[in-house]
Image (cartoon, helix red, strand yellow):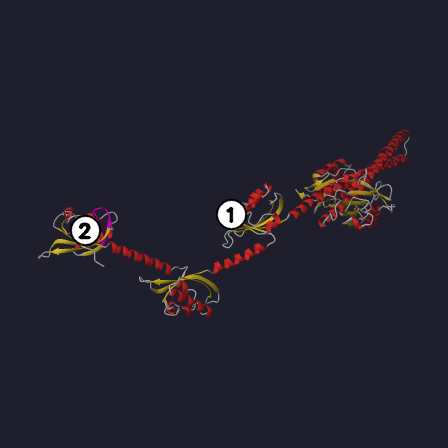
Amino acid sequence: MNESPVGITISDPSRDDNPIVYANEQFEHITGYAEAEVRGRNCRFLQGEQTAREPVAEMRTAIDAGEPVTVELRNYRSDGTEFWNRVSIAPVRGDDGEITNWVGFQQDVTVKKERERRLRRKERRYQSIFNDPNILVGLIDTDGTVIDINQTAMEYVAATRAEIIGTPFPITPWFDHSAEIQRDVREWIERAAGGEYVEFEADLVGPSGDPYTVAGVIRPVTNDDGEVVSLLISDRDITERKERERKLQRYEAYLEGSTDIITVLDDDGTITYQSPAVERILGYKTDELIGQNGFDFIHPDDEAAVFEEFTDLIAEPKNTVTVECRFRTADEGWRWIEIRGTNYLDDDAVRGIVANSRDITDRREREQALTQLQQRTETLMQTTTVEETAQVAVDTAQDLLGAELSGCHLLGDDPDRLEPIAFLDAAREGSNEPPTYDRQADTDPPSKLVWDTFERGEHLVIEDTREYDGLAEVTPTRSAVIHPLGEHGVFIVSSTTTDAFDESEKTVIEILATALTAALDRVEREQELRRQIERLDKFASIISHDLRNPLNVATGHLELARQECASEHLDGVSNAHDRMEALIDDILALAREGKQESESEPVDLAAVSTGCWQTVATADATLVVETERTFQANPSRLQQLLENLFRNAIEHGGADVTVTVGEVADGFYVADDGPGVPEDEHDRVFDLGYSTAEGGTGFGLNIVREIADTFGWDIRVTSSAAGGARFEITGVGGSDA
């Protein structure tokens, strides 16, 4: 390669700024400047914007020191183009040793600098590849001998680089666990040495026995003549990637085989995968929904709740949420589905939200039916007549089960006939009235079947009336469930189709029949109770009118007798009148006990006690209140309870008795310091008519127990600290103020 021409300049340091006094033709060839243009100028005019400061400073230092120097720097030609200039300057000295001139030599080395730059770039590229911490790199000879190996590769073997270099690559520790792998490596080397670009993948075993997988290439390295001179091996550890691939394969197999709908969505809800189960459950082709947003198929009433759950889901990796919603089907219907979504956005094998969805339409319908059944049974518990109760039951059978031929048949005045009490219009069976079932009608198959079921007391399921002789010919019913209602009658739920009721619907019928039986029992009890109350009202009226009027007459005559004569026997008559008055008051209280309202409100025990004390004839008795308890009760009935306890204390303890109202756990007590109640009589004090006080009616404590029972409270008698009687009432709830 020919050297580039050398431009020569001579400068005169004895003149200001050391100007050029000579330039040869080669200088003009290199720089584009003629001698006439540069004579008298300092050579710095060749410098420009990209000229580095360091070589310029180095030349100045040499000039100041009077020493020669060679530098390479970027200069500019007369047309403004750049070139690399190798500049050598040297002093010329006279006989006296003084510098007379400076000689400069310029040489264009641009081509050489570019070649060096490309070489350095290749070197950096090679080093970056060879020393890449993520790549296993080795350089081997064409015969397979290891020339060099990087540190990343050495981390996979229990050996040193010195032990590896110079060793045939196939027998190095990477492959000594398998003769088959060694054969493969030899084959790969032979192919690469022949100029082939060889790709490979190998399952290897590390020093600790842990398996790993690498994948890479063997590249032939050629000289300028195309001859293969070495082989460059580079590979990566793909163990994690292979495991992800295996995991993904297993996951895909699970998705394809799942009976539930498996959906994968991205973070905005777009469907990226759909399992085949979507066709069976929702009617869509497997790939029909891919690319569409899943929220577009959710019922508008459910979309907000589902979106909220989805937003929470994507906010946290591995998070899981479950939501129920209605999803549009391919035929524009709706199915209830339960979606269990898990966030796998950070999982390289999935990168999405995995939704496992199952059809819960039947379950939701059952739940809805049970909710309606609960509401209807609550309604049954609020009915007031037998007819209303029965009609609620048959209407429920129609609404929940579509049982269009249902009816309720109960015993009436005739013990041999089950009369239709409630029925649906369709149950008329083509006549003006629904059927009556007669015990004596042996020739009527429906009557015989119904009466047999009622008397046996066990429900009967008829899947197909054709299974019963003569039944199909006389009734439009094709399937039915007959439930006895205790001693009331039967509840018949029927349909015009065979096998109309599945197991869950039969359970609904059983629950409904049980609730109907309980409701009929309740209605009968309440009707009997109303009759008793009416009798009590009459009884109270007799006491209030028929007894009190003669008593008032007797009392008036007693006063007249006192005016005509003075007799100690008249006091006995007066006492008898007072006892009769007290008996009438107590009997009226008992008679009206079942009629009093039981609505409760918060009451202050201390305030009520003090108020009651003012209404009782207390003489010289004393009330002590040691409580701040409040609880729920009917104020008037609580007042009646306390007044009777106070009267009882005064009657048995005397005019100067001290009565104390205090607290016990979950309740309160009323105690006195009177003579008390003998222990063997504690169980009898609340019995009707029991009294130990002279003139006592024996009704007061019985009334107290009746009121306590109405509230659901417990009451017992014991001895007070002073030896008197102590009545404890518990179960009142409430709290201490």
Q: Which mark is residue 267?
A: 1
The amino acid sitting under disc 2 is His
**Which of the two discs, 1 and 2, sits closer to the camera?**
2
Cα distance between the residues tagged 1 and 2: 68 Å
Q: Residue at x 50, y 59 (%)?
A: 243
The answer to whether residue 126 is magenta is no
Of residues 367 and 169, the one drawn nearer to the viewer in this rendering: 169
Classed neighbour count for the residue bearing mark 2: other residues with Cα under 10 Å, few (<14), some (14–19), many (≥20): some
Can you give x and y, in whole percent of width and height, for residue 526 in the image? 80, 40
Can you give x and y, in whole percent of width and height, for residue 309 in the image? 56, 46
Q: Are marks 1 and 2 in contact (CB under 8 Å)?
A: no
Q: Which quadrant holds residue 671?
A: top right
At mark 1, the secondary structure is: loop
Of residues 188 and 712, the one drawn nearer to the viewer in this rendering: 188
Q: Is residue 321 left or right of residue 189?
A: right
Lower position in the chain sequence, tag 1 or tag 2: 2
Of residues 692 and 619, the one drawn nearer to the viewer in this rendering: 692
The amino acid sitting under disc 1 is Asp
Q: Which mark is residue 29?
A: 2
At mark 2, the secondary structure is: helix
Give, as a single range, the part of the protein colored magenta: 72-82
Q: Is residue 473 left or right of residue 252?
A: right
